[in-house]
Image (cartoon, coloured by chain):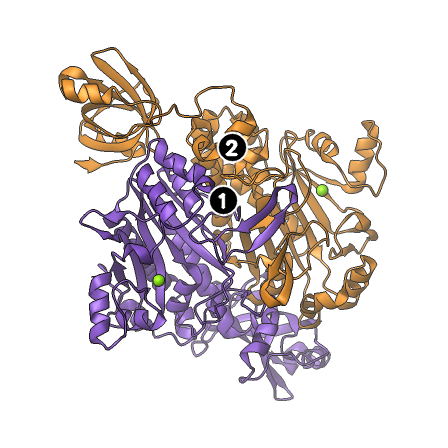
Chain colours: A orange, B purple
Amino acid sequence: MEWVYIKDLKGYIDQEVELRGWVRRKRSSGKILFIEMRDGTGFVQVVAEKSTIGDENFESADKLRLESSFIVKGKVRKDERAPSGVEILATEIIPVQIPQEDFPIQKPDHSIEYLMEHRHLWLRAKRQFHILRIRDAVIKAIRKFYWERDFVQIDTPIFTGAIGETAGNLFEVDYFDYGKVYLAQTGQLYLEAACMALGKVFNLGPTFRAEKSKTRRHLIEFWMNEAEVAYYEHEDNVRLQEDLVYYIVQYVLNNVYDDLVAIGRDVSKLEKVQKPFPRMTYTEAVNFLQKQGFDIKWGDDFGGDEETVLAKQFDSPLFVTHYPRQAKAFYMQPDPENPQVVLCDDLLAPEGYGEIVGASQRIHDYDLMVERLKEHNLPVEKYDWYLDLRNFGSVPHSGFGLGVERTIAWIAGLEHIREAIPFARTLYRVHP
Amino acid sequence: MEWVYIKDLKGYIDQEVELRGWVRRKRSSGKILFIEMRDGTGFVQVVAEKSTIGDENFESADKLRLESSFIVKGKVRKDERAPSGVEILATEIIPVQIPQEDFPIQKPDHSIEYLMEHRHLWLRAKRQFHILRIRDAVIKAIRKFYWERDFVQIDTPIFTGAIGETAGNLFEVDYFDYGKVYLAQTGQLYLEAACMALGKVFNLGPTFRAEKSKTRRHLIEFWMNEAEVAYYEHEDNVRLQEDLVYYIVQYVLNNVYDDLVAIGRDVSKLEKVQKPFPRMTYTEAVNFLQKQGFDIKWGDDFGGDEETVLAKQFDSPLFVTHYPRQAKAFYMQPDPENPQVVLCDDLLAPEGYGEIVGASQRIHDYDLMVERLKEHNLPVEKYDWYLDLRNFGSVPHSGFGLGVERTIAWIAGLEHIREAIPFARTLYRVHP
Ligand SMILES: [Mg+2]
Ligand SMILES: [Mg+2]
């Protein structure tokens, strides 16, 4: 008898199969057992009649409880009322392991702290199952997008010297006799080097920020996708981001629609995302916010509330472009038409999810880059190799970083980003 | 005029295009310039005749030197002698940036230390270009393999408690008020939790070992792919590894054959890889080595020399199975037929590349797991959540870890693993 996964059962109507999984629910009438089985690919109802499986097997099967592991042999029967489209008429039930204690996650009202402490078991909950499949789909979409466009994946290093956007918020590590190294906050600088060798490059990996933030948008360890393209200018860069984010939305709609529905996501919100995305300059955004009564002046960065109000005007993500140079990182290219602002954009997701992408054209002129490093009080000598890129065949180039968990939180409609990653690391939690 | 990448030029025969890239080589006759251009996707010869582009443009174009960036407009002409199949007849050459100094990498005899110190520029060398494309293909192959088999990607955390295979060789990080955390050496334990929720799972991410090893097989920061499957036993696990590694070999042969040839790889060696892979038990391997004159006794682990001799017997990778339990990690399932050995395997690549995969069926019995933790003097209380997996619906399960750079080194025939990753971190190097 063939071992089959639940998701494939529709191809086995009226055939005998073996399923291996766990008990999600069970009820018994004394003569008939109904077990909702899960196997990591889906859910199906198993019907075990005492008259079919025999008294002895029925008795042992009746000992199964929540999250017991078991194997069932039986026949696949079409059942149009069932969400899976089928049910299993058991001929034999083989318990694998029956817990001695109650499964720790049973109630609808566990505290979030309790659930996070039991994350290794909470992953088995239906909602978490669907969210992890949505995460998987978002990451697949990102990769497929770059593959279709001939980008080369460049895995940027985690251990780095002090360089990056900011000197603060870095985790330190003792590196043998070398001294201190730091966990990367971005692979951008390395991607800039690589795009001069390979044209179009991207990464997708873990990133670390030692930031004492406790908001629903922050993780200490999160995944980021960065892309960098030689000879791309600001407008090419904006279009690439738009294409990527639109691609992700279409991909999840086409591939994990049922998972989105299963967790109660209002899918129509995603269906409303259209290209081209709306755009505002930073200056327009400040004017808009001032009219809405926000106490903000030109030169200030936006907080979460401002981002929410800006993005809520639209169904699609909103590009805010041309920020003041003093509000942004040192490496951003000035706008030739107004050197007070830089050729950059933040992409703000709708429905209050805020910034999911940060992007810019990079300074490619050696002297201007040195000037900006000094302006930001950064140690020029540490940027030796980064400056080399402006010395040897420098070209205009642009890139961005997309926060993977923030994107998933928006796509899946999650209240808190911690559900968007299998094992979240937050200010007070590294366990399990 | 359309901006086109070199790899696509064959679709533009006799058309006018614009190319953007860098000078890889240049020679001039005074009336005609031959520039080998690279743009990150390939290489093409640009022919610029003074009579066509004009005296002034010829003069400025003649100032281009190695690794100058430039744009060329011109006509695509079929050229069957050229590796790219085409050449460009320039109508205009636009220098973008001309270095003031000589490009640092020009000679064939730079020391490896010098090259690593200039890694940000060395990436542009033809050999490195091809190796990075091979790396990209190997990683694509790994992902496609799992996608085709409905595995769900589970990104396992980098920040972890002390648990893992060994207590030593961990990098420490201060984590806010929490105290010390450690950089993960493996995501296996987390994948074990996740496979109970999703059936078949995998990861692919950076891994850290604070090991003072200076061999050509060791990196401090390397990428690893791990997979874990609920209800898989030893034999299922071996077949999955065999299928994966065979898939990678076929994928690179079908997708980056030209890159392999370009770096001088003897591709026939890869073409000889066949399924099923040869197998030996550990005990057979020890007997074989003793006959070859090795001073090894039953119970010893193999070193690099032993692995080389074992694997050199075969064209395909070699599975060595059933190691003594004391030579392996605490979580490996004993062989029911001989509890002195465990249900595990190492996969040894041919041609002296040694171990690329380590694998085992995991202990699923709670009491046996506790016994083994104590035997290994590991703190049982730290494994609370890991033990929970044996308490709540435990099932037989198996998995493995594949070293990405070791696999690339073998596939590409590299002498040293440091060329298999964009920015290698070794005992004395975290720069650039
Ligand atoms: Mg912002
Ligand atoms: Mg070994």
SS for dot 1: helix
| Location of ligand 1 given as a quarter of the image | top right
Camera-side residue of B410 and A162? A162
* Place of residue A160 in the rendered image (x, y in percent of width and height, measured from the top left): 62, 60
Numbered label attached to residue A139: 1
The answer to whether residue B154 is visible is: yes
- Viewer-nearest residue: B320 or B147: B320
Foreground residue among A350 and A123: A123
What is the tally of numbered marks visible in this picture?
Answer: 2
Left or right: residue A272 compared with residue B349: right
| Residue at (20% x, 12% y) in the render | A31
- As displayed, is residue B49 above or below residue A338? below
For disc 2, the marked residue is A117
Instruction: Report in which chain the residue with disc 1 lies.
Output: A
Q: Residue at x 79, y 67 (%)?
A: A367
Can the viewer see residue B254? Answer: no
The answer to whether residue A273 is above or below residue B425 is above
Kind of residue at disc 2: Glu
Residue A121, x across and y down, in percent? 43, 32
Chain letter for mark 2: A
From the viewer's perspective, tell me whether residue A272 is left or right of residue A256.
right
Sequence-earlier tag: 1 or 2: 2
Q: Nearer the viewer, residue B72 or A359?
A: A359
Residue B109 lies in what quarter of the image? bottom right
Residue B305 percent coordinates (x, y): 33, 73
A241 relative position to B340: left or right: right
Point out the frontmost of discs 1 and 2. Answer: 2
